[in-house]
Amino acid sequence: MTVVNTIGTDLRVWISQTFAHWRGDLTGGLTAAVVALPLALAFAVASGVDPKAGLYTAIVAGTIAAVFGGSPVQITGPTGAMAVILVGIVAKYGIEKVWIAGVMAGIIQVALGVAKLGRLVKFIPYPVTAGFTNGIAVIIFCGQLNNFLGLKLPRSEHFLPGLWQTVTQLEGLNWAAIALATITIVSKLLWARMTTSIPASLVGLVLATAIATFLHLNVPTIGSIPQSLPMLQSIPHWNDFGLIRELINPALALAALGSIESLLSAVVADGMTVSEKHDSDRELIGQGLANIVVPFFGGIPATGAIARTAVNVRAGGKTRLSGVIHGVAIAIIVLTLAPLAAQVPLAALAGILMVTSVRMIEWEAIGLLMRATYSDFAVMMLTWMVTIFFDLVLAVEVGLIAAGALFIKRMSELNLGKIPETEAFPPGIPLELSKQISVYRVDGPVFFGAAERFVTFLRDEPDVKYLVLRLRYVPNMDTTGLVALQDIYQDLQRHDCRLLLSGLQPEVQKLLERTGLMDKIGRENCFETTDAAIYSLNPTFGTSLTPKLL
């Protein structure tokens, strides 16, 4: 009942805010729809289902998740990570069983949201998320080699057998398909440098389709797409309990990945805007409802899409209306342009996905982990390898076990607390200045288990203009703690609040210097003592009273 009341209240708030933001939402929704169109087709093909299923998923799941989800700017639809799991399920069970597994996954997500377990995803260590994201990128890239080379091979349930099948069938290369895929890749890369007003994916798709049609090239195409809206359908054998037991593992995998990716996307959206932050539990409920409903319209399980959500925010989207407009716009495109979409070469979609997969690899995270701690880098590599050679769910499990072992090894707990004004401020600080300063003490190693607390405590200090973190009793810091400190710095920058550090220990200082975070924060904001940091904020004290910087 509490969840229902919350959704009802939020719907009333949404209606009142809609008219204030409708122009930005219109621009954001339309732009996200144009970007989503080729990706919906591509990820459906990558999942081993009809292209129309991707479009129907974007329409139905995108609209439902926008209304009932916990992020006001989230765009939901088919994604590469979900395609990696779906292609194996489709190859093993068939599309009808995928629909049943999708409904089961949605029910699990709703249950997780009602149980208020959405926040648990924030405790997944950074090396684990980076590892399986990079693994997904490799699988997507290699999975598109068939379409890139113009080979008509059956889909494999597992990554390595499918890759070996492709390598052993190279004598059947379709050079026309390779040329179209190359043209798509080049146009996608070059067009983005010239303008971002028209999505590069759409330009590459249209160009490759025009060339193939004009020259009558013999290349595999998407095929016919119904020029109609998704219609309600029945799901066969949904009440077969034996089948439900058979599909419980695929459903758990879809629910786990869908929840993780959607909540990570919502976190990214929070970092791009200073407006309303997302509700993790409600986001799971919204995504779950979308996955429960979309199979009855011929769609596939969906998640929040990071790239499309970012496009929506950058284009001006501010409320849930932008997600609804995104779904409606794709529906209009299906009604008017479906016959043209049938001529799209599969090689063009392969080119789009290959570029997307390369960009999915978190190159910055790899460099950061290599420069930070070898143990965190090892966790990322382990998760990466298990993702590629086994599956995503096992990769997350193995990564969490490895990260947990590191957690036990460090065997310490972060103590974080605000220092009272009577203890924090040296003599002579004006009252007006003291109201704008908060001093926090951090004791113990800053590691992944404490990163969530390290990031979120600032929400209780909306009026602070200067935040002093006393780190004298922080002997070391891992990569996730480093990213948490960087998130604090970026949040403060957006709110015109200055971050000052005092008492940095040598190991922590070296880590900040190696990773470049020291240069971002500024050495002028790092002090030997807390008193020095506070004195520096009032120029009337003079240089004689201000101790030296680090």
Image (cartoon, grey):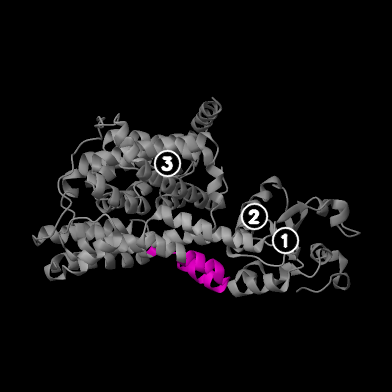
- Dots 1 and 2: beta carbons under 8 Å? yes
At x 26%, y 43%, the residue is: 53
Q: Nearer the viewer, residue 129 or 210?
A: 129
Binning the other alpha carbons within 10 Å of mark 3 as few (below 14), some (14 to 19) or many (20 upward) gives many
Q: Amino acid at mark 1?
A: Gly
* Residue 131 vertical position relative to residue 10 in the rendered view, above or below: below
Q: In the drawing, does residue 141 fall left or right of residue 117?
A: left
The amino acid at mark 2 is Ala
Q: Say the numbered circle drawn on residue 450.
A: 2
Q: Which mark is residue 322?
A: 3
Q: Is residue 371 magenta?
A: yes
* Cα gap from disc 3 to disc 1, whole angstroms: 43 Å
Provide the residue designation for mark 1: 444
Indicate which label's residue lies in the foreground, 2 or 3: 2
Q: Secondary structure at mark 2?
A: helix
Residue 477 relative to residue 174: left or right: right
Residue at coordinates 42% horizontally, 41% vertically from top-left?
322
Sequence-wise first label, 1 or 2: 1
